[in-house]
């Protein structure tokens, strides 16, 4: 009986969708876009410098590396006593040079480690790829959370 009632009932059309509501969206001026771009660029550079310097600090703390104290080698001039003055026309005797001790140069050695630090391009490339991989992973995780 239920099937017979459905056949006899007129079919109802779904209601028509209302027209979309159009709102005006303010657009930013061209000058403001450039200003924001410059601000974002400066912020990105500051963050990148902080990451690099912070990573360097952490690396040095973990490895126990401290910058080697470098002392410059200094050579002191030796002061030679003035040459004996030739007797002048008046017949005055030349003065004898005084017997002051002349300073002797003391060579100082610079403290150096057994090996030079490896600061080749390999570390820079490794740092670049490492930070790119970390940034990609964080971007992927954040985009999954937003979705």
Image: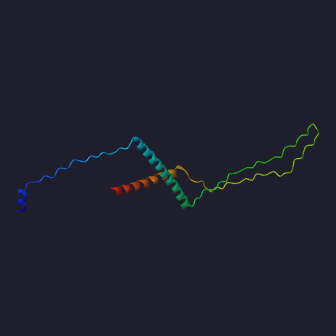
Question: In front here: 36 or 76?
Answer: 36
The residue sitting at 51% across, 56% down in the picture is 54
Question: In front here: 147 or 27?
Answer: 27
Count of numbered badges drawn on the protein: 0
The residue sitting at 54% across, 57% down in the picture is 57
Quadrant (top left/top right/bottom left/bottom right) for the C terminus: bottom left
Q: Position of residue 64 (x, y in %)?
A: 57, 61
Quadrant (top left/top right/bottom left/bottom right) for the N terminus: bottom left
Q: Position of residue 115 (x, y in %)?
A: 61, 55
The residue sitting at 36% across, 55% down in the picture is 143
- The reply, left or right, for residue 144 in relation to residue 104 is left
- The reply, left or right, for residue 15 in relation to residue 121 is left
Question: In front here: 34 or 18?
Answer: 18
Q: Position of residue 83 (x, y in %)?
A: 85, 43
Which residue reaches farthest bottom? 1
- The reply, left or right, for residue 117 in relation to residue 75 is left
Q: How is the image coloured?
A: rainbow
């Amino acid at each position: 009986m239920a099937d017979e009632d459905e056949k006899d009932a007129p079919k109802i059309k779904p209601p028509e969708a209302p027209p979309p509501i159009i709102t005006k969206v303010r657009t930013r001026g061209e000058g403001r876009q450039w200003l924001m771009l410059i601000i974002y660029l400066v912020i990105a550079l500051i963050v990148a410098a902080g990451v690099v310097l912070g990573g360097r600090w952490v690396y040095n703390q973990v490895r126990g590396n401290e910058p080697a104290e470098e002392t410059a080698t200094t050579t002191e001039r030796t002061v030679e006593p003035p040459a004996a003055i030739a007797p002048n026309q008046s017949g005055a005797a030349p003065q004898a040079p005084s017997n002051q001790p002349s300073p002797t140069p003391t060579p100082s050695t610079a403290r150096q480690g057994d090996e030079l630090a490896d600061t080749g391009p390999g570390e820079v490339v490794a740092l670049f790829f490492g930070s790119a991989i970390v940034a990609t992973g964080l971007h992927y995780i954040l985009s999954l959370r937003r979705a």
